[in-house]
Every structure is written in structure tokens, then in C-alpha cells.
């Protein structure tokens, strides 16, 4: 393994530490006979690293692709395959009743057909038929099989009649000789998030509409230059992901960012403050939760150059005339529903408390998350943050330095306790 691959692996391993909603939950992972079964070993490892107790069921066909020993090595638990085994009572009942979630990855066309028919001809099918826990199917097959009308009917039956959740498939390279198409199994980290959503739904967020702004905005100087800032978008992306994990219907509106869109939610990418405003104004009136975490440019050029500005034409100096950008949070707050929860973010370099309280009052927010841009580990383009929370009503709470993912969980723990946006008006 090269140094770059080792570094990426190390970063991933550090990120996969026991934490909610996976920690302490029991996951039954069913693995069927498809080439994507090799990814299920990584999925079992990731879920275990996140703190889940993972019981693996291998179908007979799956054992042609992966070994039980591989799963035992990454979960520390015995692998199950025999329908007629007994552990206190019938094994399929022991597994199904003790599970917080059952996930099948890969879910082949054959497994999906048997699940739709209510078959119980092997241990995995019997568990699916006997469990009352959430079930997630991660389809994996070639695109011809996936697009076949019978497969589509079976998937619809599993989703609409059985209540199973479908994770994927993705579009991409398939097995050798099968080309590129729809039918590729999601990656293990994506399936982990689907598992997290199934076991981590919060009644305060379930099916509620959540709008999050993130990242910087860029304002053109000419076709190749812009005014911007060093915001990475990490905080907003972490908030959007956490809202989705808790069951929200999430729209993430982000300025330019190199981050991949979080799993499951809707991402709208924009560039300028005015573009972000247009999307926010179209969405804000339906939102139950508003999070204004984008680092929006306060100013833009009055008249951006249509052609690249040449140094030789400047005479040694460049004067830019700036005009004020719209205040996105202020405009969105005019459109909000009466019970919408609103959270703003304040990045300050001096007098943090004064700046946060001014924003809280001026924009009529429920909470402001404030941090000092000059503090090490808490400014732009770093994976951590240290913040103080300022609440409507005067309460304040300082939080320790932590990852932005952990901070997003802390923020939502407090937002959920506010009691707004839980029931429709």
C-alpha cells in the first residue's frame, strides 16, 4: 500500500470511533451471493468500529465470494448460516427479535424476489420474514437485471408493502464485462449512514424539513478572479448530515466546496450570494428548521469585468468598487413559518459575545453558534471547532474543542429540546 493510501486509511480509521447513533446498537448484516459481497466485509468492519454489535448472516451463495472467517475477524462474532440452528430458541427468531436494524448488502435480484414473495427458505429470508425492526436493502446487480420490470415490481413491493428501506443502487462500473450502469451497490460508508438514519431517528426531526446553508460564496472580479473566504463548508455539511441521520428531509445549499454531498439528502450548489439567496427564498417558507452556517460574502463588485483584467493596463494599482450583498438570514427570516427553529452562526475576531448577541437579536434567531476565527483549531478550513451557544432568552453555553461532526450532534441535541417544529401547524 502506498503512503497516500495508508494516510487515507488512517484518517478513515480515526473517524470511525464509537458514537451515536451506532454505538451499542445491534445490527444484523445479511450478505448474499454477488460480487459486491467483498464490500460487505468493510461494511461490517465500519459498523463495528462505530460501536455497533454486528451479527452476520451469509447465504450459501455468499460463501462462494467471501469467507465467514473474514467477518469473524472484523466483528469478533460468530457468523451465521444455518436456518436450523438453535440459540436458546430458533436462530432466526433470536437474531430478528434482538436486532435494532437488519441490512442486506449486497441484496441480489434473487434475494429481493424471495423477500417480496415472503419466502423463508434460508436463514436470512426467515429473519426478514420474522423481524419487526427496520430493514434496509442495498441492491447490487447488473443494470439489465436491475431495470427488468419484475425486479422493479419486487423492489416496489418490498418498499411499499413490506416497508423496507432501499439504499441505492448507484450508477457506476459494474462487474468485469458488465460495463457501467445503474445497479452498483453503494459504498460501505454510504450504507453506514443509511443504517444510522434507520436507528437514529429523532421525533423532533422525523420527516421535518431542514434547510442548511454552507460554505463560502464567490463574487466575480473578472472571469478568472473572485472575492471569497477560506470557508470549507465542513460545519454546514456536518449539520446537514446530522439532520438527515435524525430523520429530517434535508436541503443543503452550499457555495463552492470540495466536499462530497452527504448521503441521502438534496444538495444545491451555488456560487454567489445572490444565487444562494434565490434558492433560500424559494425554500425557507416550507422549512421547519433553518441553519445559516454559510460564510456569505458581505460585498460584491458593482461592475465585474467582462474580460480578464491585465496587469499591464492597471498602472500599478487596482481599484474595486464594492456594493453590499443581501443579508440572506434576514431575508429568510421574513418568510419563515411561525414555529420554525432558526440557528445562526457568528465568526468573530474580537468581542465574540457582543457580536453573537447582536446577531441573535437583530435577526430574531432562536440560537447563535459563535466561534473565534483567531483561535487555533476553531477558525476556517479546520476539522474542529470550539463554540459558545447563545440562546433566545439569555442562556449561554460554552462547548469544548471537538470535531465538527461531534459539534453538529451537540447542536441538534439542544435544538431538539427547544420543542419547535415537532408538529405541523
Image (cartoon, grey):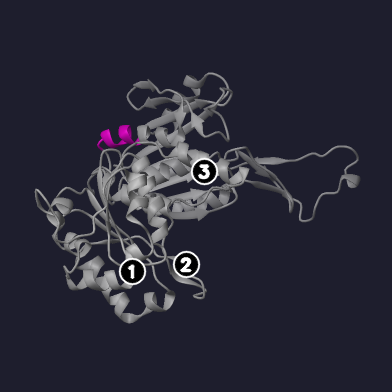
**363 over 221 or under it: above or below:** above
Q: Is residue 68 toward the left or the right of residue 292 in the image?
A: left
Q: Which residue is mark 1?
A: 108
Query: What's the mark number on residue 171?
Result: 2
In percent of width and height, residue 424 lies at 23, 49
CA gap between label 1 and label 2 equals 16 Å
90 or 391: nearer the eye? Answer: 90
Among numbered discs 1 and 3, the one appearing first in the sequence: 3
**329 over 184 or under it: above or below:** above
In percent of width and height, residue 137 lies at 30, 62
**355 over 290 or under it: above or below:** above
Chain part drawn in magenta: 412-419
Query: What's the mark number on residue 9?
Result: 3
In reply to whether residue 414 is colored magenta, the answer given is: yes
Q: Label 3 neighbourhood size at 10 Å, few (<14), some (14-19), many (20+)? A: few
Q: Is residue 250 visible?
A: no
Amino acid at each position: 500500500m502506498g503512503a497516500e493510501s495508508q494516510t487515507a486509511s488512517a484518517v478513515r480509521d480515526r473517524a470511525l470511533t464509537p458514537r451515536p447513533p451506532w454505538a451499542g446498537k445491534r445490527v444484523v448484516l445479511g450478505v448474499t451471493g454477488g460480487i459486491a459481497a467483498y464490500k460487505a466485509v468493510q461494511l461490517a468492519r465500519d459498523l463495528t468500529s462505530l460501536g455497533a454489535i454486528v451479527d452476520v448472516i451469509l447465504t450459501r451463495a455468499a460463501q462462494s465470494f467471501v469467507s465467514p472467517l473474514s467477518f469473524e475477524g472484523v466483528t469478533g462474532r460468530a457468523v451465521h448460516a444455518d436456518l436450523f440452528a438453535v440459540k436458546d430458541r430458533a436462530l432466526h427468531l433470536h437474531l430478528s427479535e434482538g436486532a435494532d436494524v437488519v441490512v442486506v448488502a449486497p441484496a441480489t435480484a434473487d434475494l429481493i424476489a424471495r423477500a417480496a414473495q415472503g419466502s423463508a427458505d434460508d436463514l436470512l429470508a426467515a429473519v426478514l420474514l420474522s423481524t419487526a425492526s427496520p430493514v434496509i436493502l442495498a441492491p447490487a446487480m447488473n443494470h439489465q437485471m436491475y431495470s427488468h420490470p419484475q425486479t422493479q415490481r419486487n423492489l416496489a413491493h418490498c418498499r411499499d408493502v413490506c416497508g423496507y428501506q432501499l439504499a441505492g443502487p448507484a450508477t457506476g462500473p459494474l462487474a468485469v464485462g458488465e460495463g457501467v450502469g445503474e445497479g452498483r451497490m453503494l459504498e460501505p460508508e454510504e450504507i453506514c449512514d443509511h443504517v444510522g438514519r434507520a436507528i437514529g431517528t429523532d421525533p423532533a426531526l422525523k420527516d421535518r424539513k431542514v434547510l442548511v446553508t454552507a460554505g463560502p460564496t464567490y463574487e466575480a472580479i473578472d472571469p478568472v478572479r473572485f472575492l471569497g473566504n477560506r470557508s470549507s463548508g465542513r460545519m454546514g455539511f456536518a449539520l446537514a448530515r446530522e439532520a438527515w441521520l435524525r430523520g429530517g428531509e434535508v436541503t443543503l445549499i452550499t457555495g463552492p466546496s470540495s466536499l462530497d454531498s452527504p448521503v441521502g439528502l438534496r444538495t444545491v450548489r451555488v456560487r454567489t450570494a445572490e444565487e444562494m439567496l434565490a434558492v433560500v427564498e424559494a425554500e425557507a417558507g416550507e422549512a421547519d428548521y433553518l441553519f445559516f452556517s454559510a460564510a456569505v460574502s458581505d460585498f460584491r463588485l458593482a461592475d465585474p469585468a467582462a474580460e480578464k483584467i491585465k496587469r499591464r493596463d492597471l498602472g500599478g494599482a487596482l481599484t474595486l468598487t464594492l456594493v453590499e450583498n443581501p443579508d440572506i438570514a434576514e431575508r429568510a427570516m421574513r418568510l419563515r413559518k411561525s414555529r420554525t427553529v432558526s440557528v445562526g452562526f457568528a465568526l468573530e475576531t474580537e468581542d465574540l459575545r457582543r457580536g453573537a448577541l447582536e446577531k441573535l437579536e437583530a435577526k430574531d434567531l432562536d440560537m447563535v453558534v459563535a466561534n473565534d476565527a483567531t483561535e487555533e483549531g476553531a477558525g476556517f478550513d479546520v476539522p474542529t471547532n470550539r463554540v459558545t451557544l447563545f440562546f433566545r432568552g439569555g442562556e449561554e453555553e460554552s462547548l469544548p474543542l471537538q470535531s465538527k461532526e461531534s459539534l453538529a450532534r451537540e447542536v441538534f441535541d439542544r435544538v431538539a429540546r427547544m420543542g419547535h417544529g415537532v408538529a405541523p401547524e
